[in-house]
Image (spheres, helix red, strand yellow):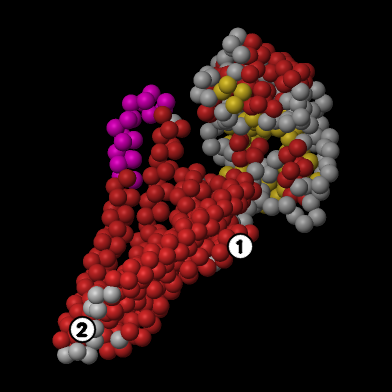
Amino acid sequence: MRQLLRYLKPYWKAAVIAPLLMVLEVAMDLMQPRMMQRIIDQGIQFKDQTLVLETGIIMIGFALLGAVGGIGCTIFAVRAAINTGTDLRSSVYRKIATFSFGNLDRLGTGQLVTRLTNDITQVQDVILIGLRILVRVPLIGVGSLIMAYLTSPQLTLIALPLIPPILIMLWFIIRRAYPLYTKVQLSLDRVNTVIQENLAGVRVVKAFVREEHEKERFGDANVSLTTNSIRAMNLTAITSPVMLLLLNIGTAAVIWFGGITVSQGDMTVGEIIAVITYLTQMLSTLVSVSMLLMRISRAQASADRVVEVLNGVPDVRDRPNALQEFHTQGRVAFENVTFGYGEPVLKDVSFVAEPGQTVAILGTTGSGKTSLVHLIPRFYDVNAGRVTIDGIDVRDISQATLRSQISVSLQEAVLFSGTITENIRQGNATADDAAIEVAAQAAQAKEFIDQLPEEYETHIGQRGVNLSGGQKQRLAIARALVRQPKILILDDSTSAVDMETESRLQRELSKIMHNRTSFVVAQRISTVLSADKILVLDNGRLVAEGTHAELIHSSPVYRQIYESQLGAPEHVSTET
């Protein structure tokens, strides 16, 4: 929590003014019992209506000043807390933007959403509470104790034995609340993850009639959140009555002893009322402390989770002397590359893609095709060996510079809410309308775009919900092409495109990517027949490379893939 308070520093003026105004409110509140004592002992007892009226007016004045202090405190506290939360949320979002794929894989979307929203809100709320209640509680508590003692030392000493059990209760709260609220936030993570997955995959759920299963999965997550929340709230429910019991015991003891002293003539009724009011205020502040500690414990659990993100170190980082300017010719080489997310996915892979070549990558599911192409733009770093571009290790080039030379169309065609133009322009922020149309034409997207009511200004729903899978893939390819990259990576990005459209797309790509290096991950072997080089992966190893004509004779794995899709080739020996 302490680390996050630095975000309050820019708003230090509001953070200082708020407590000062709270001091004014507390001072006015502490004067009210004394004024009441004066009315009872001097005004009512001696039937002095003038004194009662004057004192009443003074009390109203004190109340108005206190209201000014309280309202002012709230205004400045809200300003400081909300702005702090806004800056903190921006910092966390910017930090997440620096994370590499590995960091995002570990944290997960649901957790990050919770930390950006609920966790930061908890921290923001406790800052607001801290600038108001955390200031008020000690001031009113200590002030009431002092005023009570000045009014009647004997009655004040009666209430002091109640403080140790209250402090024990507070210690119990601190010890128990933090782990309970940590579990609550983890349960909330799981609920958000299930919701996010279901909303993103609602079509899959309905297509396979898995609504009941997903309802049960959400129900399990929801029940876990409910159970942990009830446990945390039970602590609050138990704490409050116990604190109030101790408060009432103290009040009753003061009234009993005070009644005896009044009957003996040692105290006045006004003094008794003033002392009871002060002691009630003091003990009430301790009850408030218990509730405040509950909020602080929850905020601390949330703060730790936010700090974990802020202190996170991206798996992929620029080296201190990384190149900031680099213009590639397009020669890509893998040199004894080994990579894995734990267990090796790629094992001792070596090959060279010369400038202008189209390199196709084939292999069974799980053979490491996507992992291989993700190493070129440094979405991940190799575990051993190196990936070079024009002979330079990609780790010696800054990520921004490296990726400015590369365009990628990933397996899942992710589009954003906005127009078609805006989505394509994400590949090149400076692209004009003509360049966007050329890219769309090459990606075979122009035909369906022209049929839309607003053409390029047609609004795309969230994740491209109003487009077909093939249309989304073609827009994603257009987004990659509009950059006019020296290196293009198409990661199985035509899987939802019909074969005729794909054939036209391949012809256009061969023109637009002339003298540019292309990597094509494909499931259809027809997609890669004309590639300059075909890489065949099997269980993470590069088992063959060459042209179609070479591999159909020399690679059993390639031939098996070919035959499974297109049948046995003519005039080819099947002997291994």
Tag 1: residue type?
A: Lys
Instruction: Give the structural element (helix, strand or loop) at label 1.
Output: helix
Quarter of the rendering containing residue 474: top right
Residue under label 2, please give it: 258
The residue at 73%/35% (across/down) is 406
Residue 223 on image: x %, y %: 29, 47
Quarter of the rendering containing residue 451: top right
Instruction: Give the structural element (helix, strand or loop) at label 2.
Output: helix
The stretch drawn in magenta includes residue 369? no
Q: Are marks 2 and 1 in contact (CB under 8 Å)?
A: no
- Residue 85 visible within the image: no
Q: Nearer the viewer, residue 440 or 433?
A: 433
User: Are there few (<14), some (14-19), or many (20+) residues within 10 Å of tag 2?
Assistant: many
Residue 519 on image: x %, y %: 70, 30
Tag 2: residue type?
A: Gly
Magenta segment? 203-221
